[in-house]
Structures are given as structure tokens and as C-alpha cells.
Amino acid sequence: MRRFYGVDLRDPLMLGTAQYPSPAILAEAFRVSGAGVATVSLRREGAGGAGQSFWAMIRELGVRVLPNTAGCHSVKEAVTTAHMAREVFDTPWIKLEVIGHTDSLQPDVFQLVEAARILTGEGFQVFPYCTEDLVVGERLLAAGCEVLMPWGAPIGSGRGLTNEYGLRALRSEFPDVPLVVDAGIGLPSHAARAMELGYDAVLLNTAVARAGDPVEMARAMALAARAGQSAYRADPIEPRDMATASTPVIGKAFLT
Amino acid sequence: MKIVLNGEPQEVEARSLAALLEEAGISGRVATAVNEAFVPSALRSRHMLAEGDRIEVVAPMQGG
């Protein structure tokens, strides 16, 4: 089992905490899904202290917290945000996002590698939100990352695994590296497919939070991710073009 | 002294970053940056503010 910076995840589902209809529904989605990792963020705080009640609720979930650098567009911004997140959330884990394209929210992989190099040097355990590019993966690992998180499709698009070939190539190129499909998952079948490819987890938010019934969708995603994980471990058969009889022919009655 | 707190220009009495948080009524689990540079919580009382400083104070929030 591949470990995330020395941590065994009890479940292959990581869930975001944004966009739920209410805090109670968010908490129930975590409870029924068994998701062991929650992504969180940082935003400006005022005298009202809105962030403090959110933090209290997250702590009650009893899950591992993975803060992100969402919305950052430069190395400097991402590195400063990571430092703030480490202090607030008291964890070396950071989901490193450096966005390069406004409409697709595609990562700026050049700045991503540079930010990852700086942060790993400062003791962070970096979970880089990246593309499925093999060379980018290699550079991120050389920069000190021990996990890769390629997108399946643009954030919030729900399009699933748009480049399954690329994701499979990444899996076979880095057999020992924990890999997470982060972003783009819309349906449980997408989550199952990612896990069938041998990925170690899926990270999703919108598909659950914006579903008509987020709790039921969280349950479905968790079941699908576990099913895909079991299937990968079970070593599935290869598809073939022609039929092959599953019922033995020997001993069949001669009736013609 | 005029400073900018979370994007809002303000006139404040506070001289240090720690005093500014107190004056603004902000407490709990927050992180701070002054002029886009992170200031750890342990250094807030020693970090003196200057006219025109831009201060960011952030707290936990929902994220994906």
C-alpha cells in the first residue's frame, strides 16, 4: 500500500468542504462516506470570526486536514499562503495549486514546480495539483514531492477522466508514488475508473456538494472508489474481441 | 496611522501587529501577512506597523 508522507489512508476518498447547502449536510457527507481527508482553505477574517466556527466543525469530523492554496497565481502568493495555512491548520500537508489559466483553472506547471521546490525545502509535505504530463510529474518528484495529484478534468466540470491514457501512463511511469485524481470527477463511475487504473485516492468536492442530495452522492462516491480499488487489487482480466466460453464444453451431452 | 486591513483602508491606534488584531476585534486561529510577507504569530507583538502597511488576516474557510 502506497503511503501519503508516511500516512496510511483508511479510505481512498478525499472530500472538499466547499459549496454544501449547510454545515450539517457537510458533516453528514463525511460521516456516511468515511472520507478520511478534508480539503480546506483560508480567507480573510473579520471581527465576526466566521472562520472559527468552521474550524470547530472541521475538528469535530476527526479527519485529516489538507489545506489548499486555491486561487493563487504566482509562486510568491502560493508560498506565502502555504506558510499561513501551516500555522492556522497546524499541518505540514499542503495541496499546492498555482493556477495558470482563468477559464480552465489549469495549473501553471512551471510555477508549480518552483513553488514545490521552495516548500519541500521548508519542510512542507506537498500535494501538487498538476496535469497528467509525465515530465511535469518527474520534475515535481525531483523537487521533493512524494505525491502527485493530476486533474481528471477542469475543477468543477464533472467531465470525468478526459485523458485516461495519460493517467494510465503516469501510473505505470511512477509505480511507487501515491497518485490522486484531483478535480473533474462528476460521477461515481469516474471515481471507480480512476481507482481501477491503480490510483490511490480520488479528491472531489463539487460533484458531492452540488448534487441534489449531497449525502447520498457522498455515499455513492465512497462505494465506487472502494469498488474500483478492490478491482485493481483483484487484477482484472484483459478485454478481448471474441467470445471465450465460460462454461466448460467437455462432458456436454451430445444431442444433435 | 493609516493602514490597509484586508483590503480596507483604516485609521488605527495600534503600533504593533498584535495590537492591531486586538483593536480590530480579531481573535482565534488566524494567520497574518504584512505587505505580502508572512508574519508568524510568535512575532506579531514585536512586528511594528508603518504608515501605509497592507495587512492580511486569514482564517479557516471551506475549500476544495
Image (cartoon, coloured by chain):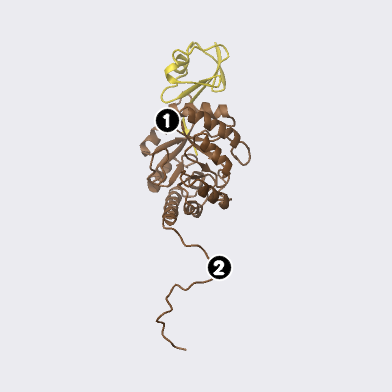
Residue A153 sits above or below residue A39 on the image: below
Which chain is painted in brown?
A: A
Q: Which residue is mark 2?
A: A241
Name the residue located 44 percent from the left edge and 88 percent from the top edge.
Answer: A255
Q: Colour of chain B?
A: yellow
The label nearer to you, 2 versus 1, is 2
Spot occupied by residue A99 in the image (x, y as percentages of width and height): 59, 36
Name the residue located 42 percent from the left edge and 43 percent from the top edge.
Answer: A25
- The span from disc 2 to disc 1 (Cα, nearest Å) is 52 Å
- On the same chain: label 2 and label 1? yes
| Chain of the residue displaying label 2 | A
Q: Nearer the viewer, residue A140 or A209?
A: A140
Spot occupied by residue A206 in the image (x, y as percentages of width and height): 51, 44
Q: Is residue A71 visible?
A: no
**Looking at the picture, which amino acid does disc 1 mark?**
Phe
| Chain of the residue displaying label 1 | A
Q: Nearer the viewer, residue A82 or A56?
A: A82
**Looking at the picture, which amino acid does disc 2 mark?**
Asp
Q: Which residue is mark 1?
A: A89
